[in-house]
Amino acid sequence: MSTEYNKPLPVPQKWSREFWKGTKDHKFLLKKCKDCGNIDHPPYYYCTECMSLEHEWVEASGKGTIYTYSTTYMGAPPVFTKEQPFTLAMIDLEEGPRMLSRIVDALPEEMKIGADVEVVFEDVTEDTTLVMFRLVK
Amino acid sequence: MSKGQFAIIGTGEVPCGWYPDRSHLEIASMAAYLAIKDAGINKDDIDGVLGQMSIMGNDWNTEVTFGRLPEALGIKNCKTTALVSSGGASSHSIRKAAEGLLISGHDMVLCVHSQRFSEFTPGQLAEGFAKAGCDPEWEIPYGMSFNALGAMVTQRYCYETGTTVEQVGSVCVAARKWALLQDNAMNKKDLTLEQVMGSRMVSTPLTAFMCNVLADGGSAFIMTTAERAKKLVDKPIYILGEGSRYSHRNLTKAKDLTRIVTKPAADEAYNKSGLGPEDMDIAQIYASYPVFTLMIFEDMGFCKRGEAGKYFMDGNTMPGGKMPVCTNGEALSFGHTGTGVGTALLVESVRQLQGKAGRAQVPGARFLIEDCGGGAFMDVHCAVLGNEIP
Ligand SMILES: [Zn+2]
C-alpha cells in the first residue's frame, strides 16, 4: 500500500459503489437482477436485459479462464510505463460475465488462452482495492 | 435511403503527417477548398456545412460547434452547420447527417474533417487514446491502452483461426505498398515483413509496425442528391447500399470479439445494392490494427473464415493484385487521423471510382465496398459505392 499512488483509480457510479465496497473487504461481488437473474458486469443503472431496478449483490467464486491476453512492453499510458512489461487479460468468470483485469505473478511465456485463473485482491490505496487474477498452477 | 438516392460529387485532402505549423482551421480550409474545386461547383450552392468531431482537439470541436466553418469558407447561403461525432465512424454518421439535411430542404452539403495530433506529446496521446478507448472505471486502472485492445483481439483471432502472426503482419506490408502510391500518405518508405516482425514488441503479439501511427490530416467531401449530382458533374459516385451494426462500448461486451459485427452490416449493404462481393473491384477497410483488416475482409465475403491471412501474405491485396484492399494505405501507413481514418478511405473510394486516384488507380474500378467503425471497435458501417447505378 502506498500513499503516493499516482495511477488512475476507478471513479464509481452510484450503482457500482457496492462493488468497490466489496473489494475493500476482499469480496468480489456481482450485480444480479432479482427479476430475471441476469448478471451485469460492468453494472449499469437498471438490468440491461429486463430493465428491472431490483437487484442483489452476489459473491463470485473468483474463478475463471483466460479468454485472451496481451503483455504490454511499451506504449502504456505514462503512469504505467515503470511497470512494463505487465499482462492484461480478459477473463471469463465462472458466473458468466467477461471482465478485463491484470494477471499478476506470471511470466509472459506462462500465459495461455483457456488457462484457469483465480482472483487476487490488490489494496492499491487505503480506500481502493482492485480485482486482479493469478494463474492457478 | 433508396439505392443511389445520394451521391458524392467532389473530394479534397491534405497531406497526412506531422505538421505542427498547420492549424485545425488551416487543414479544414485546405480540404474544403480542394473539394469545392474538385466538384467544380459554386460554393454558394452549398447550404449545409458539417464538421467531424476531432478527437482530443476540443478547442476545434468548440469552434465547429460555434459556426466557424461556414464563415471561414464563405458559405454565404448556409442554412445549417453542425458538429457530428461518432468515434471513428464519423464518415458514416456525417454522411447520415448530410442525407438528413438533403431530404429536409438543403441542396448540397459540405463535410469536413480536420485533426491535429502534433500539439500533443506521445505520452499525452497514449493517455488520451486509453481514455477514449477504454473504460475509466473497469479498464484504465489496470493500465489498459488502445494497443493492448488490438493485441488481445489479435491473440484470440489467431487462436481461433490458426492464422499466424506473420500473416497478420503481411497486412501492414500491403498497406505500405499502397501508401507509396499516395502523395498525401505519411509513410514514404517501403516496409518488409522482416521489418514488421523485427520491430520492437509493443503489446504481444503486436510489434511497433503492427500498430498505427497518429498523424495530422484532414479531408472533405461534398454530397447532394443523385438527381442534382448528374447535372453537376461527369462522374457522381452513388451510395448504392448500406448496412450498420453496433456491438459494444467495452470490448469485454463485444458480441463476438473475433468477428465484430461486419457480416450482417456487409450483407445488408450488398442486398440493398443488388451486388455481391464478386462484383467489388476494391475493398476499403477501416481497421487501424491489421487483424481487423483480415476479419472484416472475411466477413465482407472475400475469403472463408481463417483464410484471409494467407490471401494477404500471398500478395493478392497489394497494388496489381487480384483484390486491392485499402488503396490509400489506411491508418497503418497513410496515417491515423483519429476520427478521419474512415473519411480518408471514403474520399479515396470516391477518387478511385472517379478515375482520379493517380498512381494508386485501380484500372476500371466501378464498384467497391467500404466500411468504417469507431470507438474500441464498437460498430461497423458498410457501404457499397459505384460510379453507376446497376
Ligand atoms: Zn433483469
Image: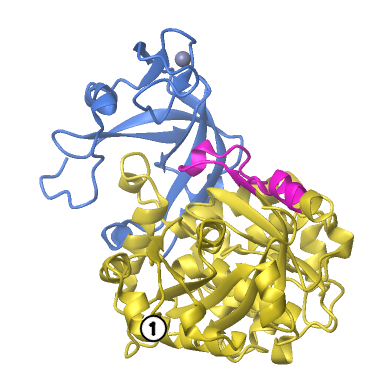
Chain colours: A blue, B yellow
Confirm whether the magenta stretch covers residue B19.
no
In the depicted view, which residue is nearer to us: B307 or B254?
B254
Q: Which corner quadrant holds the C terminus of chain B? A: bottom right
Q: Give left or right: position of A115 versus B301.
A: left
Q: Give the extent of the magenta segment.
A: B244-269
Question: To which chain does the residue with label 1 belong?
Answer: B
Asked where in the image residue B99 lies, by quadrant, the reply is bottom right
Residue wearing tag 1: B73
Confirm whether the magenta stretch covers residue B250.
yes
Q: Give left or right: position of A87 versus B210.
A: left
In the depicted view, which residue is nearer to us: B58 or A96?
B58
In the depicted view, which residue is nearer to us: B344 or A58?
B344
Looking at numbered disc 1 in the image, what kind of residue is underneath it? Leu
- Residue B140: x percent and y percent? 34, 48
Q: Give left or right: position of A78 versus B176.
A: left
Q: Residue at x 61, y 43 (%)?
A: B257
Q: Give left or right: position of B167 versus B104.
A: right
Dot 1, how many residues are within 10 Å of its Cα: few (below 14), some (14-19), or many (20+)?
some
Looking at the picture, does residue A56 appear above or below residue B128?
above
Residue B246 appears in the picture as rendered: yes
Q: Residue at x 49, y 76 (%)?
A: B46
> So how many labels did they put on this image?
1
Q: Residue at x 63, y 39 (%)?
A: B256
Q: Residue at x 36, y 39 (%)?
A: B138
